[in-house]
Amino acid sequence: MKKILLKRSFVLILIALNTACGVHIDEKKLLVKEIEIIKNAFAPDKRTALFNLEVLDGPSGFILAGETNLPLAVDSLNSLLEEKGIEATNDIKILPADELEGMTKAVINISAANLRSNPKHSAELATQATLGTVVNVLKKEGDWYLIQTPDKYLAWVDLGGIQLMNADAIEKWIASDKIIYTNTYGHAFSSKETKSRTSDIVAGSLLKLLSSNEQFYKIEFPDGRQAYILKTEAEEYNTWLSNLNFNADSLIATSKTLMGVPYLWGGTSTKGVDCSGYTKTIYYLNGMVIPRDASQQVHAGKAIDSVADFSKLKKGDLLFFGRKATETTSEKVVHVGMWIGDNQFIHSSEMVRISSVDEDSPNYDAFNVGRYLRTQRLLNEDYPLLQNLNISIPIKD
């Protein structure tokens, strides 16, 4: 009789444990689902938003662990969990990290900083940022820093590429008079008399203006180095800004100054560009900040064409190419170029070059015409992903 009772008790305990385990698993699945909902709402693109959370089993319940640079997303998650009656300990790290000790801003300190997908030199080149660009700093790993560029791109840069600054220092940098380098490529010199080089410079670089004479600008780098730049190769930033035309002819003129520049995966400078880095650079040198990648640029501006009716296109429009959607696969954007008229577009493919959509033309590009997807108009369009520098404000935390 005792053995039967013990067996029954053991069975009841197992049933209770299995039921509790099932409830626990169901709650965890629900919690993971709610996190995914918030992630899709606040951080649908991991290239521009960081929201890496996981659910851990703690001694007294669930623990939310991970990191994000989106405190509003965490607030929304907490509200959602409270509404659904789900309890969890919050152990989420909000970036910028406390370990930075207030050095949460930086300015690119070299002509073109190579930004990596992971904190090591052997990692993929994700993108570049040019001299004088203000970036947000989120965390540190050894001598590498996770930063966010003005176009919201997240990537890693080594200490040699940036000058770290606190809030006061960055305000002074932003408020200072500056010059913008307008030549495709050149150098800053240590003195007006000698040709001893302080650094190379690429188009779009921003430097603090100290003084000028008839021939030179005296400038200062973010780290305090002082040098001289020929006035024929640069312009005072405010003057340049006020003279921006925001027209297609300016875009085309700029695009042709980069003819022959080599293709570089991740490149966004006049040292080398990939296809979307090229279109981004053209627009930036005309006072417009557009998204970094072709798959992001395709969602900006106004839709113009998706059936290869090139008569609808205007100069400055962006053409997108890739894999068309099928019943089993989604559309995939892999290439972009800019329309320059006369049935031609300019793009970075092997090098910056001009191709034609006219099959009778000697530079007819059958490959890209065959994978044409759509055209978007970004020039002078009012759209959240587009920013004109003449009305912009500094990147926010």
Image: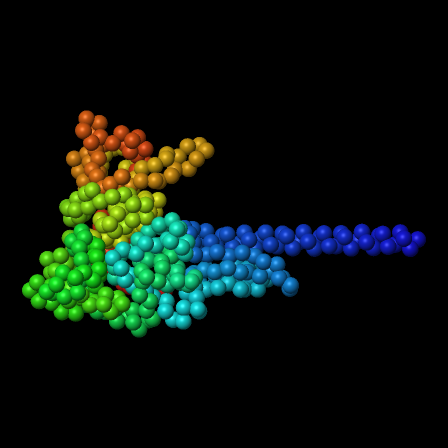
Q: Quadrant of residue 218?
A: bottom left
Q: Residue furthest bottom?
A: 168
> Would residue 314 be visible to someone looking at this image?
no
Residue at the (16%, 69%) spot, across then down: 210
Horizontally, residue 101 falls left or right of residue 311, namely right
Residue at the (21%, 39%) spot, across then down: 353
Measuring from the top left, give residue 365's x and y in whole percent. 25, 32
What's the coloring here? rainbow
| Image position of 338 with respect to 151: above or below | above
Foreground residue, 248 or 220? Answer: 220
Residue at the (61%, 54%) spot, across then down: 27
Measuring from the top left, give residue 4's x and y in whole percent. 89, 51
Q: Residue furthest right?
A: 1
Residue at the (41%, 56%) spot, across then down: 119
Foreground residue, 112 or 76? Answer: 112
Measuring from the top left, give residue 52's x and y in whole percent. 48, 56
Horizontally, residue 85 falls left or right of residue 100, namely right
> Would residue 33 be visible to someone looking at this image?
yes
Quadrant of the drawing holding the C terminus: bottom left
Q: Count the labels in the image.
A: 0
Q: Quadrant of residue 307?
A: top left
Foreground residue, 66 or 351? Answer: 351
| Image position of 379 with respect to 365: above or below | below
Q: Residue furthest top?
A: 360
Measuring from the top left, give residue 224's x and y in whole percent. 24, 69
